[in-house]
C-alpha cells in the first residue's frame, strides 16, 4: 500500500480489486475454452494451423473474419482475426494477429474485402530478437510493392511523435464486383512503435492521442478499423477498449451501468485473451482517465449558468472535480442536480426530476469512485478517502460532466 496526499486527504491505495478482476478474467478465458459457441475448429483445422502465429491464440468460429473462398483451395477463407463490436454495437474492429510471411497476402486481401481504411499496429517487426510481424508496407515514398493481387505505394510517412507514426498508402486492386475495373484508394496505418518488449508504455498520453487521431481519420464505425499486434489480443485488446470508451464519450452513450471490467469480459467472448495482462488492464483505466480529463478541459472552457432545483443546494454548473475512473467504473446518468453530503454512498441525494430548462441546457453524468496514481506513478482503486484532520470520514469523490445541448 502507498499513501498520497491529494486535495487535503490521504488516500490508501491497493491492488486488490485489480488482481481480483484479472483473476476473474483469467477464469472466464478458461471457461470459454469448453463452450461450444467459443469453438476454434477452423483455426485447429490442419490446413490452417500453419497460418497461426501462436498455437494457443486461435479465432473463435462465431466471430472470425472470413475471406472469399477460392474454389478448390481448402482453408482459403481463413485468417487469424475476429470482429469486435464497438460502441455503436456494430463490428467496429478487426482484431488480428500480425501477418506471417505466408499470410501477408491474405492480410491485404482482408483489408480489401472488408473495406478497411485504417490499420493500427502495436508492435515492431522484431522485438527482443524475435520476429513479431511480417513487414507489409514500404518505407520509401512512391515505392511500390505487390502483395498477391494488391499493389501498395507509400504516399507519405509522418512521425507524429517519438511514440507513433502514420503511413498513408495508396492501394490498387481489381474490383470485387468487376474484374475489369481497377480500384484505387488510400489506407492509413497508425504504427505505435514505443510499446516495450515487456510490460506497457510508461506514458499513456501518446497512446490516447493516437486513438483520438484514428477517429479523426475514420469517424464512423460502419467499416472496421483493423487493429493488430503480434498475437492480436493483448495490446490489440487494449487499444480496442480505449477506443470503445472514446466512442461512448463522442456519442454521449455512456450508460449508468458501464464497467470496464464488463467491457473486457465482452471482448474476451469475441476473441481470446483480449487485454491479456494486469498491466494492460490498468493501462486501459489510465487511458480512459485521460479521455475524461480531456473532456473536462473542453467543458471547463465553456460558460455555464447556475442551476437551482427545488431549493436544493446544488453544485454550480461548471464546477468540476478532477476526472478519474474506478476499476468498477460505476457510472450514473443524471438529468438533475446533485446534493453532496459527507457519509456513505447512500447519503447522496438526487433530485427526482428536472425542469425542462435544465434538461435543455445540460445532462449530467456522475462518475463514482476513482483511480488515483500511486507514488510510483501506477494506478490503483481508491480504498479510503479521508480529511486531512485524520478523521478518516469517507467522502464520495465525484466527477460532473456537463454535456451541452442545443436549446
Image (cartoon, rainbow, N blue to C red):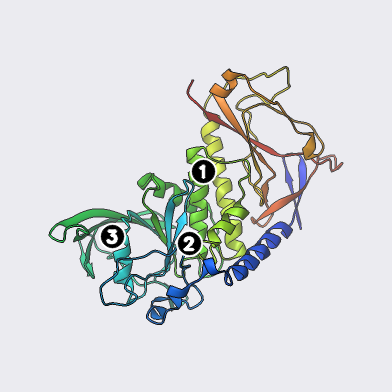
Query: Element at badge 1?
Result: helix
Q: Residues within 10 Å of mark 2 (few under 14, many from 20)?
A: many
Tell me residue 139's x, y (percent): 28, 64
Identify the residue under disc 3: 112
- Inspect this view and state whether residue 293 appears: yes
Q: Is residue 388 left or right of residue 251?
A: right
| Left-right relation of 404 to 72 | right
| Any part of residue 192 in sight | no
Marked residue nearer the N-terminal end (3 or 1): 3
Secondary structure under the numbered disc 2 in the rendered image: helix
Against 212, is 189 above or below? below
Are dots 3 and 1 in contact, CB under 8 Å?
Answer: no
Mark 2 touching mark 1, by CB under 8 A?
no
Q: Which residue is mark 2?
A: 236
The residue lying at 44 percent from left, 50 percent from top is 90
Q: Nearer the viewer, mark 2 or mark 1?
A: 1
Could you classify mark 3 by the number of other residues whose Cα lies within 10 Å: few (under 14), some (14-19), or many (20 or more)?
A: many
* Identity of the residue furthest to the left in this view: 180
Nearest the viewer among 55 and 294 is: 55
Front position in the image: 141 or 103: 103
Direction from residue 34 to residue 12 in the image, left or right: right
Q: Is residue 321 above or below residue 79?
A: above
Q: Which residue is mark 1?
A: 248
Instruction: Judge by depth and name the residue closer to the eye, 94 or 374.
Output: 94
Q: CA distance from mark 2 to mark 3?
A: 20 Å
Lower sequence index among marks 2 and 3: 3
> In the rendered image, which quarter is residue 333 located in?
top right
At x 69%, y 62%, the residue is 19
> Residue 80: image x %, image y %?
41, 70
Report the Cα–Cα distance between label 3 and label 1.
28 Å
Q: Judge by depth and name the residue closer to the eye, 218 or 67.
A: 67
Amino acid at each position: 500500500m502507498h499513501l498520497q496526499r491529494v486535495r487535503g486527504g490521504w488516500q490508501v491505495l491497493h491492488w486488490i480489486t485489480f488482481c481480483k478482476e484479472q483473476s476473474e478474467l483469467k477464469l472466464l478465458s478458461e471457461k470459454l475454452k469448453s463452450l461450444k459457441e467459443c469453438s476454434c475448429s477452423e483455426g485447429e483445422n490442419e490446413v490452417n494451423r500453419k497460418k497461426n502465429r501462436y498455437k494457443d491464440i486461435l479465432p473463435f468460429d462465431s466471430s472470425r473474419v472470413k475471406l472469399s473462398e477460392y474454389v478448390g483451395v481448402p482453408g482459403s477463407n481463413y485468417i487469424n482475426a475476429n470482429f469486435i463490436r464497438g460502441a455503436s454495437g456494430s463490428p467496429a474492429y478487426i482484431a488480428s494477429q500480425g501477418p506471417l510471411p505466408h499470410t501477408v497476402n491474405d492480410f491485404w486481401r482482408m483489408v480489401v474485402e472488408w473495406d478497411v481504411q485504417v490499420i493500427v499496429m502495436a508492435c515492431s517487426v522484431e522485438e527482443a530478437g524475435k520476429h513479431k510481424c511480417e513487414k507489409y508496407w514500404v518505407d520509401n515514398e512512391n515505392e511500390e510493392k505487390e502483395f498477391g493481387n494488391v499493389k501498395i505505394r507509400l504516399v507519405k510517412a509522418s512521425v507524429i511523435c517519438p511514440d507513433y507514426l502514420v503511413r498513408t498508402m495508396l492501394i490498387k486492386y481489381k474490383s470485387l464486383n468487376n474484374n475489369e475495373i481497377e480500384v484505387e484508394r488510400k489506407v492509413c496505418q497508425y504504427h505505435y512503435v514505443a510499446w516495450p518488449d515487456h510490460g506497457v508504455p510508461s506514458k499513456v498520453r501518446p497512446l490516447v492521442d493516437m486513438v483520438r487521431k484514428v477517429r479523426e481519420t475514420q469517424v464512423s464505425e460502419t467499416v472496421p478499423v483493423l487493429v493488430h499486434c503480434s498475437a492480436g489480443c493483448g495490446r490489440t485488446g487494449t487499444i480496442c477498449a480505449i477506443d470503445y470508451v472514446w466512442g461512448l464519450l463522442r456519442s454521449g452513450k455512456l450508460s449508468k451501468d458501464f464497467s470496464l471490467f464488463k467491457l473486457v469480459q465482452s471482448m474476451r467472448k469475441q476473441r481470446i485473451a483480449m487485454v491479456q495482462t494486469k498491466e494492460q488492464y490498468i493501462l486501459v483505466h489510465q487511458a480512459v482517465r485521460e479521455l475524461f480529463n480531456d473532456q473536462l478541459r473542453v467543458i471547463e472552457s465553456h460558460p455555464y449558468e447556475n442551476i437551482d432545483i427545488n431549493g436544493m443546494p446544488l453544485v454550480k454548473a461548471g464546477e468540476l472535480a478532477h476526472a478519474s475512473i474506478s476499476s468498477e467504473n460505476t457510472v450514473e446518468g443524471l438529468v438533475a442536480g446533485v446534493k453532496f453530503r459527507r457519509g456513505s454512498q447512500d447519503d447522496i441525494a438526487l433530485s427526482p426530476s428536472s425542469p425542462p430548462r435544465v434538461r435543455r441546457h445540460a445532462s449530467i453524468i456522475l462518475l463514482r469512485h476513482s483511480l488515483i496514481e500511486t507514488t510510483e506513478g501506477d494506478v490503483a482503486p481508491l480504498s479510503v478517502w479521508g480529511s486531512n484532520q485524520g478523521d478518516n470520514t469517507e467522502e464520495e469523490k465525484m466527477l460532473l460532466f456537463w454535456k451541452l445541448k442545443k436549446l
